Amino acid sequence: MTIKQGRANAIEAEGLTKTFGKKVRVQALDDLSLSVETGSIFGLLGPNGAGKTTAVRIFTTTLVPDRGRALVLGQDVVARAREVRASIGLAGQFAAVDENLTGKENLRMIGQLNHLSRHQATARANQLLGDFGLSDAATRPTKGYSGGMRRRLDLAAALVRRPRVLFLDEPTTGLDPRAGSTCGQ
């Protein structure tokens, strides 16, 4: 596969390789190549230790590959990391919410950190709290949320600024499949 600039793919990788450790070397990725078409839903599946999180960290610019190249929306994740971060959302393996803030305060804060006005941030927070079935808990500190509620709040936070590409690392961790909420953007 050869990565070509300007293609309609949301994500492209060619020959991604990443090794960790100095004394004991662990090959986390070995020549990963893939392309994900814009507008599609793509799941990277594999056993524990297969390199899924390492790949996500490279695509989201928090880790630099040893070899290979990756593009997100046509932008090189190393050379154009800032541009890539401006167009993506990420919900990592563990919920990244401030447990001393309420659900609404968490989402408003993320909105304002992403340059939404106070009014826009509040409106977006209210919409996402409703979409994720958290309206009734919106004014409670998140330290009192169940694990599933925290995870839903974290997923909502990843959508605050309406990213063009959304990365979910272990997206079902802590979620109750019977919860039945509809999660819209």
Image (spheres, rainbow, N blue to C red):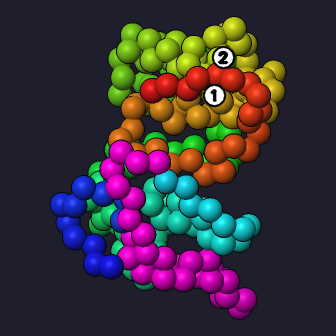
Task: Give the secondary structure at mark 1.
Answer: helix
Answer whether residue 181 is magenta in the image. no
CB of mark 1 within 8 Å of CB of mark 2?
yes
Q: Which quarter of the rendered picture does the C terminus lie within?
A: top left
Q: Image check: 182 left or right of 127? A: right
User: Splitting the image into 4 quarters, where does residue 10 fall?
Assistant: bottom left
Q: Residues within 10 Å of mark 1 (few under 14, many from 20)?
A: many
Residue 136 vs 180, above or below: the answer is: above
Residue 153 is marked as 1
Task: Answer with the quarter of the image where residue 157 lies.
Answer: top right
Q: Is residue 143 visible?
A: no
Q: Which residues are magenta?
A: 13-41
Horizontal and vertical percent for residue 34? 42, 69
| Residue 24 located within the stretch drawn in magenta | yes
CA distance for labels 1 and 2: 8 Å
Q: Residue furthest left?
A: 6
Examine the residues drawn in magenta and state their main secondary structure.
Answer: strand
Which of the two labelled residues, at mark 1 and mark 2, occupies the earlier sequence position? 2
Residue 88 location, x and y as percent?
A: 40, 45
Residue 103 image offset from top left, x and y in percent: 64, 20
Quarter of the figure with the N terminus: bottom left
The residue lying at 40 percent from left, 31 percent from top is 161
Residue identified by numbered label 2: 134
Q: Is residue 2 left or right of residue 148?
A: left
